[in-house]
Image (cartoon, grey):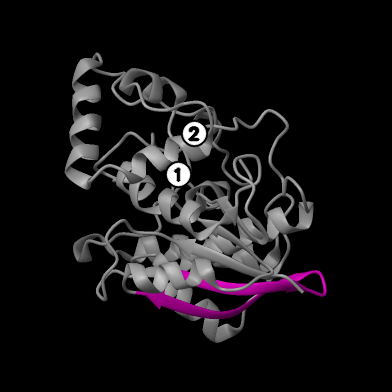
Amino acid sequence: MISLIGVDFTSAPRPAKPITVAHGRVDGGELHLDRLSALPDWRSFEALLAAPGPWLGAFDFPFGLPRQGLAALDWPSTDWAAQVRHIATLDKPGFRAAFDADRLRRPMGARYPHRHTDTAARSHSPMKLVNPPVGLMFFEGAPRLLAAGCTLPGLHAGDPARVAVEAYPGLLARRITRASYKSDTRGKQTPERRDARERIVAALVAGTLPGSLPCALSVAQQAGLIDDPRGDWLDAVLALAQAAWCEQRGAPRFGAPPDADPLEGWIATA
């Protein structure tokens, strides 16, 4: 049986704000959440990527950059691995400076080019460095996937027993409720956001999302997801649901659409 992993990512993991991971499996037509884990540093995240398979993980960070952005920066755009190897040669200040310069060259209202899959999923441009810093998430995450030798369907052939797909938990959450369901700011951790988390968890358990499996969460697991005001654990479980969606569609593409861009990447369930 293949193990499934859902990862809510941060570009600066630390004990106060770790990378959160939901571990599970599909059994008996249901998605089971076996455990949750917190990764407080890069060493623990890299150990997760290196763990022997078979596993399929859905990771909440962009796997690629927009073709338009790569062209403007004059960075490699022949294939995904070449793009990421170039990123790995940069330090963070250099990466930031390149993105800042590109943004300032663009007109107001069009400063952040999007990938095709971002448009479909209504996700942020990987060129953004703040609110949220998804560009930094790409900078930290994609080179580690390449170095670990994982397979990224439609992008890169690596170890077929360790498969990584791009997740976007907010995509599933929006299909359940348009209401905000999380905040890192204490003053914004309101009863209304808790109610939204409760609706999301109920939908996961019922399996009402198109193409999804019911999630067999215990009462205690449901309470833990609802009571986390930052939504990190819930995002990890939403990513786990996206991993299950991909696993159900199977190798070799695991749900990648036929027109998925082999340079920019694709978001599961978009």
Q: Disc 1 residue type?
A: Pro
* Residue behind mark 2: 118
At label 2, counting other C-alpha atoms closer than 10 Å, the crowd grade (few under 14, some 14-19, many 20 or more) is many
Q: Reading the chain from its start, which is encountered first: label 1 or label 2?
A: 1
State the separation of the CA atoms marked 1 and 2. Answer: 9 Å
At label 1, counting other C-alpha atoms closer than 10 Å, the crowd grade (few under 14, some 14-19, many 20 or more) is many
Residue at 47% in and 66% down: 234
Percent position (x, y) of residue 39? 38, 74
Q: Tell me the quarter of the image containing the C terminus.
A: top right
Percent position (x, y) of residue 263? 54, 32
Residue at 48% in and 29% down: 115
Secondary structure, mark 2, is: helix
| Res. 229 in view | no
146 in relation to 75, above or below: below
Q: How many marks?
A: 2
Percent position (x, y) of residue 171? 53, 46
**Residue contact between numbered discs 1 and 2, judged by CB atoms under 8 Å:** yes
Secondary structure, mark 1, is: loop
Q: Tell me the quarter of the image containing the N terminus.
A: bottom right
Q: Mark number for residue 254?
A: none
Q: Please tell me which residue lies in front, 171 or 159.
A: 159
The magenta region covers: 21-39
| 1 vs 2, front mark | 1
* Residue behind mark 1: 62
| Res. 51 in view | yes
